[in-house]
Amino acid sequence: MIISQQLLRAENARRMREVRPELAARIDLMTDDGLLAAGREVTAESAEPKVLAVCVLREFDLSAWIRETCVFAHRVAGEAAAAWRHDFTRTVFLAGNPANLRERFRFDHVADDGSTAWLGPAPAEESTSLRRLLKLFPAGAVLPNVSGTAVRLPADGTADGRVPVLRELHLATAGLTLAQALVHLHHLLAEAVLDGVLGPGDRLVVRPAPHLVGVAGPFAALRVGPSHRRPHELRAHAALGAARPL
């Protein structure tokens, strides 16, 4: 399986049917016009999301951030998970020191080293004061070299019979800023955890490449979005490879 426009459109349509069946029912997501129409509607709605999560970053270390993102997502369940998925796991990234904020805000997850913290997912109005207090994570920050970064997700001590696996985490880096990488990876990782694709004890190895067109599957999850240069085309921003034994 090779990443192609047909594969990306099929994955885009599948995600839309699962998250917004009412939208997929009236728009043909496999056509150029349908793709653009759906994109316009989702973009308009995302300007005023009903449910979102907020991630506050004091500093960025990819390995630690991936691990904590998965730990955070693993704690989201039930109605909160369903509502978050309905808003496409929308997450806002802010620059700040969680240690200076814990008396004012009750975070839902804080990394052990205090480098990152998450609030929500919850109704957007519940994080308004935090979002007004802090600035967005710098949009122009450059993505550091992440090739070969390895991450082992914490085991949670449950005995459900699940065997941890190894997966490659592919990231398309051409024209990518650090802030954009956070968005794409957070969507991919959070939804993979919610779907049970990623679980406690799994190990990830980051494989960056300018583009993912030549990367062979099968894929356990794909992060698909519009191409910045060709709005009628889709781009694979990130992908999770097939499971391999540890």
Image (cartoon, rainbow, N blue to C red):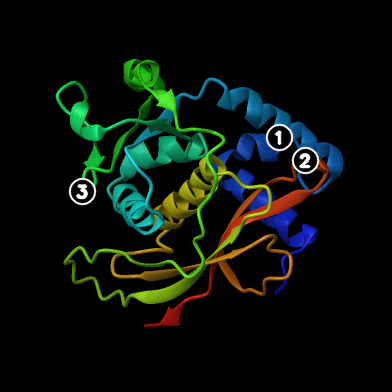
Mark 3 or mark 2: name the one nearer the start of the chain: 2
Badge count = 3
Residue 225: % across, % down: 67, 46
Q: Is residue 246 above or below residue 162?
A: below
- Under circle 2, the secondary element is helix
Q: Is residue 58 left or right of residue 22?
A: left
- Under circle 1, the secondary element is helix
Q: Nearer the viewer, mark 3 or mark 2?
A: 3
Within the image, what quadrant is residue 203 found in?
Answer: bottom left
Q: Nearer the viewer, mark 1 or mark 3?
A: 3
Q: Is residue 225 above or below residue 38?
A: below
Pick the front one: 150 or 88: 150
* C-alpha separation, residue under disc 1 versus residue under disc 3: 38 Å
Residue 179: % across, % down: 52, 40
Residue at position x 40%, y 63% in the image: 198
Q: Is residue 223 above or below residue 163?
A: above
Q: Residues within 10 Å of mark 3 (few under 14, many from 20)?
A: few
The residue type indicated by label 2 comes to Leu
Q: Is residue 78 above or below residue 67?
A: above
Residue named by callout 2: 35
Residue 126: % across, % down: 32, 20
Asked if the residue at tag 2 contacts the one at tag 3, i.e. Cβ–Cβ closer than 8 Å, the answer is no
Pick the front one: 136 or 107: 136
Tell me the tag on residue 39.
1
The residue type indicated by label 1 comes to Gly
Residue named by callout 3: 113
Asked if the residue at tag 1 contacts the one at tag 2, i.e. Cβ–Cβ closer than 8 Å, the answer is yes
The residue type indicated by label 3 comes to Asp
Residue 245: % across, % down: 40, 84
Residue at position x 31%, y 45% in the image: 76
Q: Is residue 12 left or right of residue 129?
A: right
* C-alpha separation, residue under disc 2 versus residue under disc 1: 6 Å
